[in-house]
Image (spheres, grey):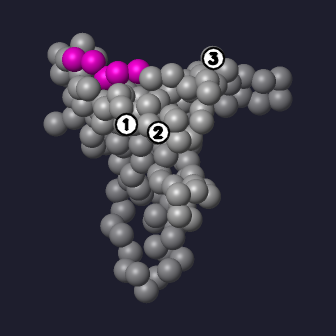
């Protein structure tokens, strides 16, 4: 599927795989492998960025995937985020969706919303919030209505 379909149908917190369709090169070809890894990967959908128009440029809508965090002890040093424009030539697949009863920790960013964390329960989400100290974040439960709408409308991952 295209990035546009992911933008329209995937909920925040969904696990998205992207690929250019080429086979993975052997590890001995370090440069080719690094280039392949930039165009093939897996990430959690954390934000859907609407198109932006400025006097000097126009940016198309995009999806932002969190590809992982690198930590030292309990301190996160770097979070790898990758932005994919909706006009990307890559292929996308929704690998997993948040399940009923999970909680999203969301932060408003301008007119948009960003997923900070996806927790298995309200208690886990509140504990994560207490540890990280995001004062403006809010919790949102993944409901049966949301999951049911995905199944009825044909958006649920097979």
Q: Classify 10 Å Cα crowding around label 1: few (below 14), some (14-19), many (20 and above).
A: some
Q: For residue 155, say whether it is visible.
A: no
Rendered view: 94 above or below 109: below
Name the quadrant containing residue 44. top left
- In space, the residues marked 1 and 2 are separated at their CA atoms by 6 Å
Q: Earlier in the sequence, mark 2 or mark 3?
A: 3
- Give the residue at mark 1: 124
Q: Secondary structure at mark 3?
A: loop
Rendered view: 116 above or below 136: below
- Give the residue at mark 3: 111
x, y (%) of residue 112? Answer: 59, 21
Q: Earlier in the sequence, mark 3 or mark 1?
A: 3
Q: Which mark is on residue 128?
A: 2
Identified at 46% across, 64% down, the residue is 37
Residue placed most toward the observer, 148 or 77: 77
- In space, the residues marked 3 and 1 are separated at their CA atoms by 27 Å
Decide if residue 109 is on the left or right side of residue 94. right
Q: For residue 25, say whether it is visible.
A: yes
* Magenta region: 140-144
x, y (%) of residue 16? Answer: 36, 43
Q: Where's the C terminus, which quadrant?
A: top left
Identified at 72% across, 22% down, the residue is 53
Q: Nearer the viewer, mark 2 or mark 3?
A: 2
Magenta stretch holds residue 127: no
């Amino acid at each position: 599927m295209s990035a546009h379909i992911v933008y329209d149908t995937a909920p925040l917190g969904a696990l998205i795989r992207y690929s250019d369709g080429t086979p993975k090169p052997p590890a001995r070809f370090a440069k080719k492998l690094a280039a392949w890894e930039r165009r093939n990967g897996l990430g959690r959908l954390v934000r859907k960025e609407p198109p932006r128009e400025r006097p000097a440029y126009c940016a198309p809508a995009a999806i932002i995937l969190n590809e992982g965090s690198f930590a030292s002890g309990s301190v996160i040093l770097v979070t790898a985020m990758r932005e994919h424009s909706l006009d990307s030539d890559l292929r996308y697949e929704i690998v997993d969706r948040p399940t009923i009863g999970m909680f999203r920790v969301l932060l408003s960013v301008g007119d948009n919303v960003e997923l900070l964390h996806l927790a298995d329960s309200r208690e886990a989400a509140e504990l994560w919030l207490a540890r990280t100290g995001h004062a403006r974040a809010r919790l949102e439960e993944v409901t049966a209505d949301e999951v049911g709408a995905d199944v009825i409308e044909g958006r649920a991952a097979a």
